[in-house]
Image: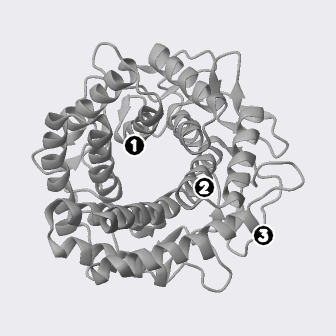
């Protein structure tokens, strides 16, 4: 076995089993009100009265279900059950076959607009839970939610999906999704997480309907959202896919470079794989050449017109770079990508992992020397990126070892 890959595997297994999952099982569980806390600070103290957000709670279902599937530890299944049961009871809106965006500390809905990015993660969580446990109920929840998204959020004219809706599923661009302005009717970020969710569902629901939706979504990503001139995603676009901004996001680009290939692999169509492979390797190379720093850090956002770059580093961008570069090494055999994957993991271990109190810091200063985020857990901050990074390494290592 390649020594660098072996080191990645050893680091991933240790980090997942001895830090990431134990931290969330110890510090994130809300024993008083059920489910998980809405926020926990950098000292591992829950923030009083914090609300609970759809993205965090859906990602917790996915993380612990996936961990149970990959590692088989029944403690992980118990956490997946806890996350799933709480989500169904408090976030699921049976009247509209949809998910609430936010509930209070007691689980009462306080924001009922349809946040499509968050609903995508609900599909992801339900689908992985069904895959890991065999739950027919979870599969049906995923299918019901997809049916709603296709009925109300899908754009039959230009393809793709809108950003947000009112409670009754009326499309409402003035209600923020992950867009900046109402003119940003299509966003790369929402579509990226829609495709991972639909791909996960396709692993269990192999119907023609899901095959067709996943294929269409992949080609929308490849044809409309990738800028093939510079090998980066367009960030924000209008309904007809005209760009409304010039910024690029290295983290999303490297994440997309492996997620779109995963979609093509699950779809199992050679022509889709050829197209995705070429596009994704161009994106990985662009991220390596432009966004990957000598010390192992993956940079955040960059405006190629003004030259302005984000003055921070985020935990999730490092995680996605580790997987994206590992994937690029597997596809191309170019050792520089394996070196980059290992180097990025080592940077994250040195700077983002809290070796004193456990868990991960979320955001650091640009040089990695200062923690600038106040919490280890909140609406978007979760174990999905770093947990998935570790599980991707473990599963890829196992596959290569078996070969």
Q: Position of residue 64 (x, y in %)?
A: 62, 54
Picture quarter with the N terminus: bottom left
| The quadrant where residue 197 appears | top left
Note whether 398 is above or below 130 in the view shown.
Answer: below
Distance between the alpha carbons at the discs numbered 3 and 1: 30 Å
Q: Residue furthest right?
A: 32
**Element on which disc 1 rests:** helix
Q: Nearer the viewer, residue 308 or 242?
A: 242
- Is there any visible trace of residue 171 in the rendered image? no
In the rendered structure, are the residues bearing label 3 and label 1 in contact, judged by CB atoms less than 8 Å apart?
no
Q: Position of residue 266 (x, y in %)?
A: 33, 39
The first of marks 2 and 1 along the sequence is 2
In the rendered structure, are the residues bearing label 2 and label 1 in contact, judged by CB atoms less than 8 Å apart?
no
Quickly name the residue at label 1: 189
Note whether 373 is above or below 272 in the view shown.
Answer: below
| The quadrant where residue 399 appears | bottom left
Q: Nearer the viewer, residue 162 or 81?
A: 81
**Element on which disc 2 rests:** helix
Q: How is the image coloured?
A: one colour
- Is there any visible trace of residue 225 in the rendered image? yes
Quickly name the residue at label 3: 45
Circle 3 or circle 2, nearest the eye: 2
């Amino acid at each position: 076995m390649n020594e660098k890959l072996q080191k990645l595997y050893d680091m991933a297994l240790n980090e997942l089993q001895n830090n990431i999952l134990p931290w969330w099982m110890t510090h994130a569980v809300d024993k008083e009100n059920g489910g998980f806390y809405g926020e926990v600070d950098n000292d591992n103290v829950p923030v009083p009265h914090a609300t609970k957000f759809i993205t965090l709670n859906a990602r917790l279902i996915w993380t612990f279900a996936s961990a149970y599937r990959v590692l088989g530890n029944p403690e992980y299944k118990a956490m997946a059950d806890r996350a799933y049961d709480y989500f169904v009871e408090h976030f699921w809106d049976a009247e509209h076959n949809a998910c609430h965006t936010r509930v209070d500390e007691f689980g009462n809905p306080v924001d009922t607009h349809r946040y499509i990015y968050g609903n995508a993660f609900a599909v992801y969580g339900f689908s992985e839970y069904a895959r890991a446990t065999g739950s027919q109920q979870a599969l049906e929840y995923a299918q019901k939610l997809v049916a709603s998204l296709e009925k109300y959020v899908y754009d039959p004219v230009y393809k793709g999906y809108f950003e947000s809706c009112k409670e009754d599923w009326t499309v409402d661009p003035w209600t923020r999704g992950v867009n900046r302005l109402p003119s940003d009717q299509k966003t790369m970020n929402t579509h990226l997480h829609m495709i991972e969710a639909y791909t996960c569902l396709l692993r269990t629901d192999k119907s023609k309907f899901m095959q067709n939706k996943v294929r269409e979504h992949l080609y929308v990503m490849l044809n409309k959202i990738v800028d093939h001139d510079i090998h980066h995603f367009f960030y924000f676009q209008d309904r007809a896919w005209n760009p409304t901004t010039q910024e690029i996001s290295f983290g999303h680009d490297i994440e997309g470079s492996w997620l779109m290939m995963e979609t093509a692999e699950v779809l199992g169509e050679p022509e889709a794989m050829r197209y995705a492979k070429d596009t994704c390797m161009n994106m990985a190379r662009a991220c390596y050449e432009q966004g990957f720093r000598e010390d192992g850090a993956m940079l955040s956002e960059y405006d190629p017109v003004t030259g302005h770059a984000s003055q921070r580093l985020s935990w999730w961008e490092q995680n996605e770079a580790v997987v994206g570069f590992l994937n690029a090494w597997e596809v191309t055999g170019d050792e520089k990508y394996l070196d980059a994957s290992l180097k990025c993991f080592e940077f994250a271990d040195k700077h983002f992992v809290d070796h004193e109190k456990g868990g991960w810091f979320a955001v650091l200063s640009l040089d990695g020397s200062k923690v600038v985020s106040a919490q280890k857990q909140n609406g978007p901050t979760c174990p999905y990126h770093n947990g998935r990074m570790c599980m991707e390494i473990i599963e890829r290592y196992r596959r290569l070892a078996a070969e």
